[in-house]
Image (cartoon, grey):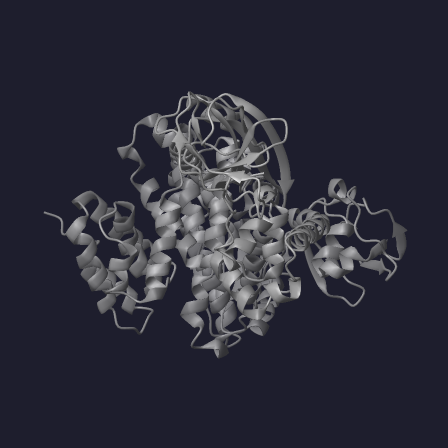
Amino acid sequence: MTKEKNTIENLIIEVKKYLQVDTKVLLDAYELSKKYLDSKLEKETLETAFILTTVYADIETITASLLYKLLSLEKVSEKDLLKYFDESIVKITKGAFKLAQIIYSTENEYLIEYYKKIIVGMTEDVRVIMINLASRVTLMRNINEFKPTIAKKLAKESLEIVAPIAHHLGIYKLKSELEDLSLKTLKPEVYNDIVEKLNSTKNERDNLIKKMTIEVKELLDSHGINYEIKGRSKSIYSIYNKLDKGRKFNDIYDLFALRIMVSDESLCYLVLGLIHSKFRPIPKRFKDFIAMPKSNGYRSLHTTVFGVDNTLFEIQIRTFLMNEVAENGLAAHWSYKENRKADNLSSTDQKLEFFKTVIDNYQNKVDTGEVIEEIKDTKMHGNIYVFTPKGDVIELPHGATPIDFAYRVHTKVGESMVGAIVNNEIVPLNYVLEDNDVVKINTSKQSTGPKLSWLKIAKLTQTKNKIKSYFQKERKDEIIKYGENSLDSYLRKKHISKKEFLTEDNVSKILKELKCKDLTELYLNIGNNKYTPHNIVSLIYPNETPKILKKEIIIKNNRDINVAGIDNIKVNIASCCNPIPGDKIVGFITKNNGITVHNVECFNVRDNDRLIDVKWQDETNGKYLTKIRILTNSSTSYLGDLINKLTSLGLVINNIRTSIIDMKYNFEISFRVSGIKEIDNIIKSLMKLGYVTDVWRVFK
């Protein structure tokens, strides 16, 4: 009987190979998960943890990977975990649990929602994403357990969404495995054909790589260089990509490859010179990713030469740390953080800058559909490198314009841009930049800011979102001002001094009660109709209720409302506050139109001596108009879905008003209901929709 390899004991051994930490926390996490998980989930959890050790994940990440399925199965609560584990571990566990709840789909709208939530997770802690990637590799390794239709769906998601994320994080080890496993599921005939061709040439390739390695070793040894050399096999999916573009198997140059690692950057260039002195390089096949790193921090020298037996070899030359970053992405940062002198960590810093870019995109209300297209586009076409007049290198995607360049330098440069000069010639703003262009941006203090037409010219999603953000801010300022004026007007109407009302103590109480960080956010919420001025004032003056004329006799009439001391009188429902059964109400005696019934909180009946006591019947039969406001987190309108949802609840919609604030759709919808219980159930049903962030009843 074969002994199980993936055990907690072996996991601890693997962790100790690269981390000098107390591993008791891993044992504690495993024992807790083993208590609740079935054997299948326990096995998958351990496999995910082992995968994380291959990319040098830290102890917190691996511990969280052993725990997060407990939250998914509702076996253990977050509060329970805090009794046994540090807050940092529980936070990562919670993040991994949230990602595990996402329903993956390659349908466009779900794909957009999926990537948006990925970014949200990244803003909290990128280690959450690492668990998600490792878990997806575990799933793909066990893909045969699924029905063919489901397996192909999972493989498509892995290839189009998950693998590109691993690529952008620089975790190539997981990226390559996801790509190969996905290809094997989606196109098994193609996958097996490539494997067969590779196997048929394996002995030949092994002999050639061995002969080339010996010659390179002799060359480097003769110059006293300390190094490590490895033969590198090209991934099956990478070969498939080249074949898919019309290349013949025998014409793929880098089937034969060597990777040389040295101790510092200067030796990389020395080794390159020695290789070129002995083996003839192919023109235009040399790439310097050390001087010009990729956006995800990848650094290395690449060259293709005619090696032994006149065979083409791709040679990659890098430092040991560059190799760790290339193989394991961000994880190399933790592995080397205690030994920064080992090498320059600029590649890791650049990788962290990439995270910042993604987070900036999210904070600028990124259109995630565009992000996905940009990821695919970058993966397909690569990047260009252009220069500032001072010689600084700026990396941009193919198709980028001077507008993208300006905003990449700094947002202020983009907002004050009035023109561009490329290679000493004035160019239009829609000029498409090319490799090695020298770009100068002309700015002016008199600039009126970016133009909406720039959105059609810019290539980068980040550029577009910064332009959108500029215009959103102007609109936001208008809403804030409107909210402030509304409160001022209400205070004047009630003869309340603004200075006396907005004292430090009062403001503190209001902000705490409504969970606003400052007065600006409060005014924004008033301007967005989330709160009325009356809601705000009543927090400070809760006892300021309408003065009601008391009558001793309540005569029951044949309507839904009892009017104190009066029978057979015309009763109207006030349109300013639209009270419904269950609300506290008061009657207003009109001159010629009977009694108008208001919500007691309605500011139109405050401090009035023409009020009369009214109340709802114990049982009512009518339907009453009410209005709700729905906030969403989406730049896509879900109006049709909302209408279907409300209709399924038996409602007849009276009116709909749509607005867009901060590039998100919001709705005000009015309809008739039987009372408070019905409206509460409607709000609960709407809050279950994934794109809905808040729902409340509007009283005006």
User: Of all residues shown, which one is farthest toward the bottom?
Assistant: 341
Rendering coords of residue 527 (x, y %): 64, 48
Q: Is residue 342 above or below residue 106?
A: below
Residue 564 visible in image: yes
In the rendered view, does 133 fall on the left or right side of 1?
right
Residue 284 visible in image: no
Q: Residue at x 38, y 29 (%)?
A: 617
Residue situated in front as seen by the camera: 355 or 289: 355
Residue situated in front as seen by the camera: 484 or 184: 484
Rendering coords of residue 353 (x, y %): 58, 62
Rendering coords of residue 525 (x, y %): 59, 50
User: Of all residues shown, which one is farthest toward the left?
Assistant: 1
Quadrant of the rendering where the C terminus is positioned:
top right
Q: Residue at x 68, y 49 (%)?
A: 479
Q: How many marks?
A: 0
User: Of all residues shown, which one is farthest toward the right?
Assistant: 425
Rendering coords of residue 230 (x, y %): 43, 60
In the rendered view, does 525 fall on the left or right side of 321?
right
Q: Residue at x 63, y 37 (%)?
A: 659
Q: Is residue 619 above or below residue 42?
A: above
In the rendered view, does 33 fall on the left or right side of 220?
left
Q: Is residue 420 above or below residue 214?
A: above
Q: Is residue 687 above or below residue 121?
A: above
Residue situated in front as seen by the camera: 694 or 471: 694
